[in-house]
Amino acid sequence: MDNSSRPIYICLGALIFLLMMSNCSAVPQNSEISFTGQVVWMDIEGGFYGIITPDGLEYLPLNLPESYNVDGVTVDIVGTVPSDVMTIHMWGEPIEIQSINPVQAENPFIQPWYSPRKQSYYEKETMAEYLIMTASGLQTGLDVIDRQVSSIAKNISEMGIEEKNLKSMLLQGLDIPGVYEVTFLDKTGRLTAIVPEQYEHFVGEDVSGQDLNARLLSYPAPGMSEYFTTVEGMDAVIVAYPVFSADKKIAGYLAALFDPANLTEIYSVPYLNRTNYDLMVAEPDGTILYDGHPGMNGQKTWNNSKFAEFPDLLTW
């Protein structure tokens, strides 16, 4: 063997050693232990149920009763850590359960996702995978809105902005998942048509001062607004497209309003079913667009004490 190959084996040996060390037990083997933990579904290596304590310790139950195969249930456990058991899952400390009971008292796990908790390498990897899936799902929702609004704007340009045609075209926009209102603005930025009917009393309102509308009036190109409160008092993001007349001049602007929290629930949250993960979506300035906990949408991460443990969120 030449010397050039030795460092490879040294590095590989060090890696195996570290992996073995990380899997060594901190609990005396064959000793009885008791603890409170939360049953969690781990969607890795084919999927299995594990148990995590409030301190972040991870246990792999070898004989979890089927009735406790419920993600999120909190239990009191008495069990032993066997000395001669190997499993196919590179996760947690194997434990043989002697007794298990549901916790009826206050659940120590009922806390926001941003409460600090130790995470394993595998949990971080799994979270990263879910983050990619949820982000991709939300992007799909935005792409659907963009394509549909573009198509409707093109149809209006071809058919004209007569009231009868315009109303039927706007109603098509309400079929886009996540969209709750569709409007048409004239060349000056005044609302001339709105669906659904419950918002029609805002027809005639001048919304030219809204950021996106001001940009459209100065440069008529497709765009998306930031998160804001509409004249109707709703939280919204707007996707807007210019509409042209037969002689290729600006005839007005089509705008579809959607609540990003609702869009997230449609396209992203379903990926987290059967997991114990929560999701937060925010704008680059730290404005929270979606959070599964009440009262968080619309708040800023940088001035919220709940995020003090996470400086990256404070300087988003």
Image (spheres, grey):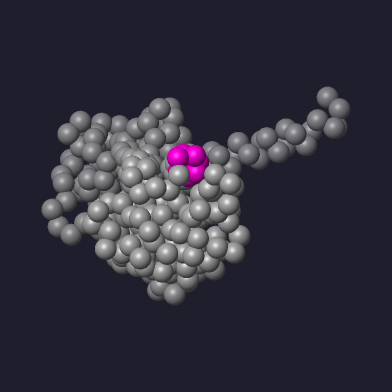
* 273, above or below 202, in the image: above
In the rendered structure, which segment of residues is drawn in magenta? 153-159
Q: Residue at x 58, y 52 (%)?
A: 249
Residue at the extreme left of the image, as rendered: 104
Magenta span contains residue 148:
no
Q: Which residue is drawn at 39% across and 47% down?
A: 162
Q: Residue at x 55, y 60 (%)?
A: 216
Horizontal side of residue 86 vs 71, given as left or right:
right
Q: Position of residue 179 (x, y in %)?
A: 36, 48
Q: Position of residue 8 (x, y in %)?
A: 75, 34
Q: Position of residue 221 (x, y in %)?
A: 58, 53
* 208, above or below 52, in the image: below
Return the residue nearer the eye: 226 or 309: 226
Magenta span contains residue 154:
yes
Q: Can residue 48 be seen in the rendering of this structure? A: yes
Number of dots carrying numbers:
0
Q: Which residue is drawn at 27% across and 51% down?
A: 196
Return the residue nearer the eye: 108 or 180: 180
Return the residue nearer the eye: 196 or 118: 196
Quarter that holds the N terminus: top right
Q: Can residue 313 be seen in the rendering of this structure? A: no
Q: Where is residue 197 in the image (x, y as percent from the top left)?
A: 25, 53
Which quadrant of the view contains residue 191? bottom left
By secondary structure, the bulk of the magenta-drawn segment is best described as helix
Horizontal side of residue 165 vs 128, given as left or right:
left
